[in-house]
Amino acid sequence: MRVPVFHLNAFTDRPLSGNPAAVCLLDSWLDDGQLRKVAAENNLSATAFVVPVRGSYELRWFTPACEVRLCGHATIASAYVLFTRFQPELDSIVLHTKFHGAIRISRVRDLLCMSLPAIPPQPCSSPNGLELALGLPSRPIAALEANETYTLVLNEEEEVRSARPDFTLLEKFHPHAVAITAPAKTSDFVCRYFAPTYGVPEDSVTGSLQCSLAPYWAKRLGRSQLHARQLSERGGELWCEVEESRVLVKGKCALTMEAMLEF
């Protein structure tokens, strides 16, 4: 079997930065075991599988370890491939997902814009041992929970940058992933995201995290349009807009490889 595979960096326009994703174009769905093996073969933080169905597309995402319910960077990467390689005449594409229904991606000048569900976080108590597991330099000012993710809010950007997480300790909070965030100097906010039990110790740039962070920062800062940066080693940036029950997440993509996978 031969499958077209594209490797892209999402939420950046430069090589060697942003969040790498693989996009595989299939004629029809493989069984879940084969999808997991292909994702493990790609060995990137996410592999998106796209199947044309009745004039539209279905989309699923796998890390090297398992299927995930929502993945922003592999969604925007999939749309980039469809726009540039298969349907350049279109200005928007709808991708139908297993867990979150239809996701529309549009071209907005030099950005791609995803419409994702808003998932406002709720205040919670910081889980026992989480601050130690994250290696935080100081106490957080708030703890939030949304979409099986604990988020600790810190005072300033440098505290997010200097956190030194212990991934073995973070695994104890499964099924929750963990994020940290703070107000920023050259953007509205910064963040980092950790999901070691899902095969992603630290994610480079996390589009789906903005479903909860954008509503939080929009309410806190009093504006609906936000600029975010993720302070991973590779780094990346996103532009978000909160619209009632949706969050528009905008970013760029850079294609780094195009190949055929045979198995």
Image (tube, grey):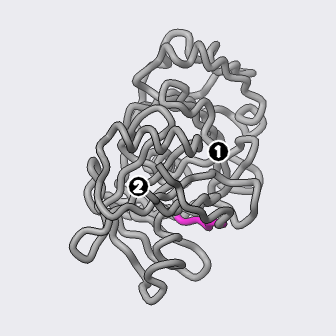
Toward the bottom, the furthest residue is 89
- Quarter of the view holding residue 258: bottom right
Whether residue 218 appears in this view of the structure is no
Disc 2: CA contacts within 10 A as few (<14), some (14-19) or many (>=20): many
Q: Position of residue 107 (x, y in %)?
A: 50, 78
Per the image, the residue denoted by label 1 is: 204
Disc 1: CA contacts within 10 A as few (<14), some (14-19) or many (>=20): many
Going from N to C along the chain, the mark reached first, 1 or 2, is 2
Depth check, mark 1 against mark 2: the one in front is 2
Q: Nearer the viewer, residue 263 or 98?
A: 263
Marker count (numbered): 2
Q: Residue at x 35, y 37 (%)?
A: 33
Residue 118, relative to residue 91: is it above or below? Answer: above
Res. 30 mark: none
What kind of residue is marked 1? Ser
179 drawn magenta: no
Q: Main secondary structure of the magenta part?
A: strand
Residue 262, relative to residue 161: is it above or below? Answer: below
Q: Residue at x 60, y 58 (%)?
A: 7
Q: Residue at x 28, y 72 (%)?
A: 56
Q: Which residues are magenta?
A: 250-254
Whether residue 157 appears in this view of the structure is yes
Q: Position of residue 18 (x, y in %)?
A: 68, 54
Q: Which element is circle 1 on? A: loop
What kind of residue is marked 2? Phe
- Quarter of the view holding residue 90: bottom left
Q: Residue at x 36, y 69 (%)?
A: 104
Q: Position of residue 232 (x, y in %)?
A: 71, 41
Per the image, the residue denoted by label 2 is: 49
| Left or right side of 100 for 256 | right
